[in-house]
Image (cartoon, rainbow, N blue to C red):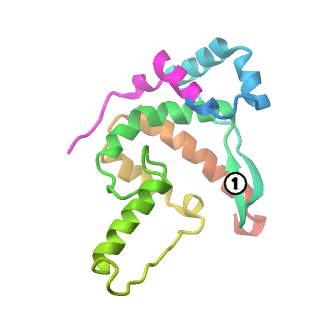
Amino acid sequence: MDISSDIYHKIYEWRNLVLAFEKARKGKTKKDYVIEFQENTIDNLEQLQFELMSMSYKPKSLETFILRDPKTRKISKSDFRDRIIHHALCNIIEPIFQKVFIHDSCANQKGKGNLFAIKRFNLFKRKVTNNLKSEAFCFKADIKHYFEEVNHKTLIEIIKRKIEDGKVIWLIKMILERERERRHETLPKACR
């Protein structure tokens, strides 16, 4: 079992932060918050690098809004600087976890979008129906509010099976803690 330790420094390496910035701004170059960040890109990235190096990084509050497309969903959006940190973290830990993902898992996987999912579905459909000679049924499901409801303590324990670097775990906890605080803020006072 591969376990990664001493990888935190890779997250705040300059090349990784620049790559994370490029990923975070992709498709958003005309947004005000991206334009504002770009006015002092080097200073802003250096500030993020310092905060990561000194472990003084604190994510900003999430912005929550309602999206209707076609179903109504409550969306929580991280600040742009925090999204850069998310990308920087994912650039380093994604390859560690990618090895153990199920091949047919498509959500947020590079090269595995809708087209990949449809091709895999058609392959399995043909196998199950004996090349469409018999009937079969498909069950489609979605876990409602998964990211709001997943137990963060359990999630961290699972992550620790692959990552032993305590500083990386600290960063992940900081990001998850902001989500927990947002959830807590949206609960009625009687439920807190």
Q: Residue at x 33, y 70 (%)?
A: 124
- Disc 1 crowd rating (10 Å Cα; few below 14, some 14-19, many 20+) is few
The image shows a total of numbered marks equal to 1
Q: Residue at position x 49%, y 74% from top?
A: 140
Query: Could you say which is closer to the camera, residue 102 or residue 58?
Result: 102
Q: Looking at the picture, how far across and down is residue 5, in whole percent?
A: 30, 32
Q: Which residues are magenta?
A: 1-22
- The residue pinned by badge 1 equals 75
* 49 in magenta: no
Of helix, strand and loop, which one carries label 1? strand
- Quarter location, residue 119: bottom left
Residue 174 placement, left or right of 163: right
55 vs 98, nearest the viewer: 98
Against 35, residue 170 (above or below) is: below
Query: Where's residue 133, x and y in %?
Result: 32, 84
Does any portion of residue 54 appear in the rendered image?
A: no
Pick the residue in front: 107 or 12: 107
Residue 181 lies, with reference to residue 95, above or below; the image says below
For the N terminus, the quadrant is top left
Q: Is residue 57 visible?
A: yes
Residue most extreme to the left? 1
The x and y percentages for residue 26 are: 62, 32
Left or right: where does residue 26 sit relative to residue 65? left
Residue located at (59% from left, 14% from top): 46
Asked whether residue 6 is drawn in magenta, I would say yes
Quadrant the C terminus occupies = bottom right
Name the residue located 61 percent from the left edge and 35 percent from the top edge: 83
Residue type (three-letter) at the residue carrying disc 1: Ile
